[in-house]
Amino acid sequence: MAAYRLVGVGGGGVGKSALSIQFIQSYFVTDYDPSVEDAYTKQCVTDDRATQRDILDTAGQEFGAMREQCKRTGEGCLLVFSVTDRGNYEEIYKFQRQILRVKEREEFPMILIGNKADLDHQRQETLRLLQRLSDFLKIMICIHRHVLF
């Protein structure tokens, strides 16, 4: 069975854990519980073949752990930010540059995920601004209420 290892990266409180748990367990977490580092696994069907998705959920403030895991095992990164907080949105560029340095590559598979889109009344970013960031970083952007990866 083919396995795909993804590393979730983003500032503290952006919803990396909630996103991972929603995908793996189909359960929405409402309480914020800062994680140190968690790993999740789910078997999926991709192109009519059984595959395994491994997601490493890194701590928001601990970049060292993400850097080491991404260097050793990550085949792609999920750059997660909250659309309700411009501060963590601005961290994405720093994370993306650091990942490319660690991987010693000019390109690496990454998806930009705008989380907490259901909190429209708190939204601070516009789709146009996010599209500019996505174009600048040359990575795909994903802003939905339900994300399947």
Image (cartoon, rainbow, N blue to C red):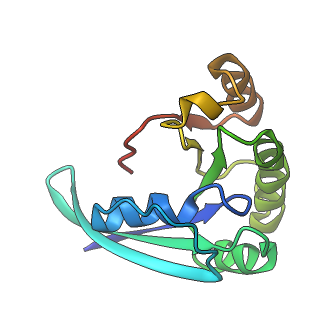
Residue under the image location 56 percent in, 71 percent down? 57
| Residue 75 seen in the current view | no
Give the left or right position of residue 93, taking residue 14 as reference: right
x, y percentage for residue 59?
A: 68, 74
Q: Nearer the viewer, residue 5 or 128?
A: 128
| Image: 114 above or below 69 | above
Q: Quadrant of the N terminus?
A: bottom left
Give the left or right position of residue 44, taking residue 22 as reference: left
Residue under the image location 72 percent in, 67 percent down? 60
Q: Nearer the viewer, residue 146 or 101?
A: 146
x, y percentage for residue 149?
A: 39, 51
| Residue 12 seen in the current view | yes
Give the left or right position of residue 73, taking residue 118 as reference: right
Give the left or right position of residue 98, taking residue 60 as reference: right
Q: How many numbered discs sit on the rendered protein?
A: 0
| Image: 92 above or below 56 | above
| Image: 29 above or below 78 | below
| Image: 118 above or below 14 | above
> Which corner quadrant of the image does residue 61 belong to?
bottom right
> Which corner quadrant of the image does residue 122 belong to?
top right
x, y percentage for residue 143?
A: 51, 34
Residue under the image location 62 percent in, 51 percent down? 80
x, y percentage for residue 99?
A: 76, 60
Residue that extends furthest to the left in the rendered view of this protein = 48
